[in-house]
Every structure is written in C-alpha cells, then in structure tokens.
Image (cartoon, rainbow, N blue to C red):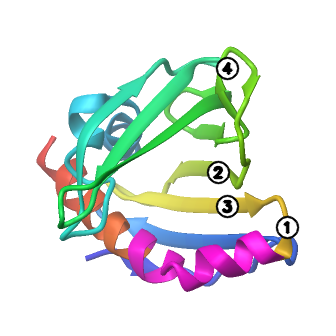
Amino acid sequence: MTTKLDIAPNSDRELVLARIIDAPRENVYRCWTEPKLLTQWFAPKPWTTPRAETDVRAGGTSLVVMAGPDGNEFANPGVFLEVVPGRKLVFTDAYTKAWEPSAKPFMTGIVTLEDEGTGKTRYVARVAHWSVADREQHEKMGFHEGWGQCAEQLEEVAKRL
C-alpha cells in the first residue's frame, strides 16, 4: 500500500497527489509510458481503460480511453510537453495532436519520480488547471480519491514487473 506524502500545491489552480510507491522508479515510469501497462491501472475501479496509445517524447501524442461501468467510453487525447526518461512526464489536454488546440483545455499534468530508498519511488503528480473553477470541478469529480486509488493500482502493477 502506498504511503501518503503531504505536499502543498504551488497555486490555487493546482491539485497534488504524492505517495511513496513500493516499486522501483523504472517500473513506475514504464507503467506511465507503456500502453499495455497503462491500461491496467489508469482508471479507478470500477472504471476501466480499454485503450491507450503513447508517443513518449516532447510533442508526442497520447490517447487514453476510459470506460465507465455502463460501458460508455471517454477519450482523453493529449500531448507530451516534456519527457525526462525515468524521471518526469509533463502532459496536457490543451492540444490533441501536433499542436492542434483542443476544444476545451482543462489541465496540465506533471509527474515526477525519484528514488526513495531501495526499490521505492517518490511519486508526485501535480495537476495545474486553467482556472480555479476547473480545479474545483476536478476536486468535485473526485481527484484525491480517484487519483489515490489509481496510485494504489499503479503500485500493484509496478510491483509485478
């Protein structure tokens, strides 16, 4: 089970989830970047992730499709803004592909990974929103519970690698 860390947001438009994950940093990074692994943990149960595509490089696209318990699918296209292999991913839904603006930008995610003792990873996910209203909406959607559950699921997958 992940260990919670208390890290404050940098602004009133940011949400933060921080954990110590009981798996090596390289495995956690693979879970974020390899579609076959991403589909195993990305959506909080009972939701699923039936499909994921990643082109993990600055300017590369990503597509993560989540499905609700009723089977309705929700596509989440985006673009990677920065990639530091094994250590950092910055991605946004402000673009859908090749710098094509999305209809309604909502967030930019910054995931950092650091070694935290033998076989453990300091995992910090910062989510910056375009407005306070967007941040509040994300909180009401269950950011802390959902991303927390996903961190637990991420740990389970990363430990098996």
Residue at (64%, 51%) from the top-left corner? 109
Q: In the image, which residues are magenta?
A: 133-147
Mark 2 and mark 3 in contact? Answer it, CB < 8 Å. yes
Examine the structure image and report whether residue 112 is included in the region drawn in magenta: no
Mark 4 and mark 2 in contact? Answer it, CB < 8 Å. no
CA separation, marks 3 and 4?
18 Å
Nearest to the observer: residue 83 or residue 23: 83
**The C terminus is located in which quarter?**
top left
For disc 1, the marked residue is 131
Mark toward the viewer: 3 or 1 = 1
CA separation, marks 2 and 3?
5 Å
Vertical comparison of 136 with 95: above or below: below
For disc 4, the marked residue is 58
Residue type of the residue flagged with mark 2: Gly
Query: What predominant SS class does the magenta segment belong to?
Result: helix
Residue type of the residue flagged with mark 1: Ser
Question: Would you identify the image quadrant in which residue 44 lies?
Answer: bottom left
Vertical comparison of 142 with 147: above or below: below
Question: Under tag 3, what secondary structure?
Answer: strand
Along the polypeptide, which appears first: circle 1 or circle 2? 2
| Badge 2: residue crowd in 10 Å (few <14, some 14–19, many ≥20) | many
Question: Under tag 1, what secondary structure?
Answer: loop
